[in-house]
Image: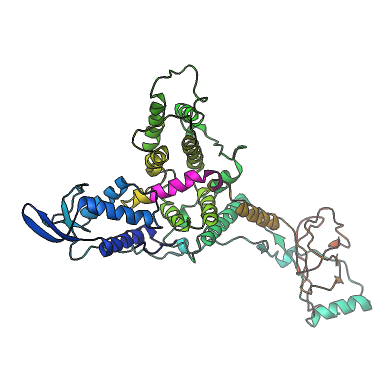
Amino acid sequence: MEGKIIGPGPYRATKLWNETIRLFRGGMPSRRHWLHFRSYDNSFTGSEAIDWLHELLRRNHNFGPEVTRHQTLQLLRKFLKNHVIEDVKGRFGKEDFEDNGHLYRFPPESPLKPLPQRPREMSSVALPRLPQWDDYEEVSAQGTVPLRPLVLNSETWNKRHSIAIGEVHECKLIRRKEITAKHLDQVWRAMTLAELQRVLGLQSLDGVLDSKDINPKHIIHNVYCVNKQGIVVLKNKADDLPHWVLSAMKCLANWPNGCDGRQPMYPGFERDVFRTVAEHFQRLKEPLLTFQLYEVFVNILGLLQKQQVAAEALQVCCVLLPPANRRKLQLLLRLMSRVCHNPTLPPLNDAIATRTLMAQTFSRCILSSADEVDLDELLATKLVTYMMDHQEVALQVPAGLQKSVEEHISQLRRVQVSSCADEELYRWGALQVRSRAQVSSCAGEELYRWGALQVRSRARVRSCTLSCYFHCKPATLHSSTTSSA
């Protein structure tokens, strides 16, 4: 019974818990057992439960073959505590489940966890509005530029007449709002959340992420403040790892050439260095992926079957981290990957393989929930194992997102001249536009003839909104349809 794959969506960890209970109750074999000269029907031993559930979890795509027997034992202890199972005398509530011949059974009903009901707030459901290039303010009529009297002839009269009868929409000159740092933050925040929603394949981020927790300045810093290796560079060095931790990580990552020659080299020295690094990260008050982003990263676990999509999702999610957390995560995953692929490094544990040791040691330092989540350890180990194996790709800056944002910001800063007629060129009064496409900037164009604007280029006219400069100041030029011929 491999079960169904729980894909991305709200409260995925709770859904996985309920699915695991359903599979365990539906498939765990039970039979008559004898204990102290007494028989117990529909029971199973602790060792039998571990064997069967361990195999189930390893074959289940929601967890995978990385699940260890010890993790299975820990899960069964939580089952006993939550009355998913009980011993044959009806006792439960303590995590004293052991890998032995003690007898257990299922109660009449195993409680499933209800899905949390959160109030539906617009601020956390709807994506932030994305600023557009045509966000502008119309200048009041008092600010119009005085025009020189127009001498009518047959050509100018035809142009004015075409506007009056509705063949051409009235043209107005507008003042573009200046692009501020606040606007840039809004663009990065809105487009990053939209990209995250797209790559997760969700119609809404409700129950997955509260947009209030996203700091756009963190995103901008993580994208642009990096060194040649792509590692985040911090402005405040006090937020970085202590020097002695960095030295220990460098020693292990470049073993045997990374150690300072002045340091003592004795049997087991590499294990002491590893213990030093592990103890520092295990003392962190918050996991590197933060409590606020826990549900987002749990949702990525549902995408691991599609490795390209999972990598894109991790790239987007990781730029949401505070810069100090992202830097520490980058350095730690690089260390874990190098240690696993270094054949010259002696074993760091006699009983556990190095790759498994890395995942078990640092999984809770990287991902965990602020509240008690019964599948925390299994989910964290699965995600950390994947990130360790794909750290070079998973922690890259999302190039597609960066390109889209930069293009949008460039468009916001661009002056676009176009006409609603889309094909005709009009010269009326003091305005003459000759073009075939967008005029990206007024700089370099011929301006200011007869007190208004003259733009000469080879661009296509596409909208009646015009942004330009005048001798004194930006203003509004209204081409009124009520002017007398």
Query: Is residue 228 rendered magenta in the image?
Result: no
Q: Give residue 282's position: percent from left, percent from top.
A: 37, 37
Q: Along the horizontal axis of the image, is 16 left or right of 176?
A: left
Can you tell which quarter of the image residue 278 is in? Answer: top left
Give the quarter of the figure containing the N terminus.
Answer: bottom left
Pick out the residue farthest to the right. 153
Q: Give residue 113's position: percent from left, percent from top.
A: 29, 62
The residue under the point 56% across, 37% down is 233
Q: Along the horizontal axis of the image, is 460 left or right of 142?
A: right
Q: Is residue 360 above or below residue 373?
A: above
Q: Which residues are magenta?
A: 379-393
Q: Give residue 179's position: percent from left, percent from top.
A: 66, 53
Give the quarter of the figure containing the C terminus.
Answer: bottom right
The residue under the point 48% across, 16% down is 262
Query: Is residue 384 rendered magenta in the image?
Result: yes
Asked if one can make out residue 473 in the rendered structure from this viewpoint, the answer is: yes
Q: Give residue 432's position: percent from left, percent from top.
A: 86, 66
> Which colour style is shown?
rainbow
Residue nearest the observer in this picture, 215 or 259 = 259
Asked if one can make out residue 374 in the rendered structure from this viewpoint, the answer is: no
Residue nearest the observer in this picture, 83 or 418 = 83
Residue nearest the observer in this picture, 74 or 241 = 74
Q: Is residue 359 above or below residue 205?
A: above
Q: Is residue 317 above or below residue 434?
A: above
Pick out the residue farthest to the bottom. 165
Q: Along the horizontal axis of the image, is 253 left or right of 85?
A: right
Q: Along the horizontal axis of the image, is 419 left or right of 352?
A: right
Pick out the residue farthest to the left. 37
How many numbered marks, from 0 up? 0
The residue under the point 87% across, 57% down is 446
Secondary structure mainly formed by the magenta segment = helix
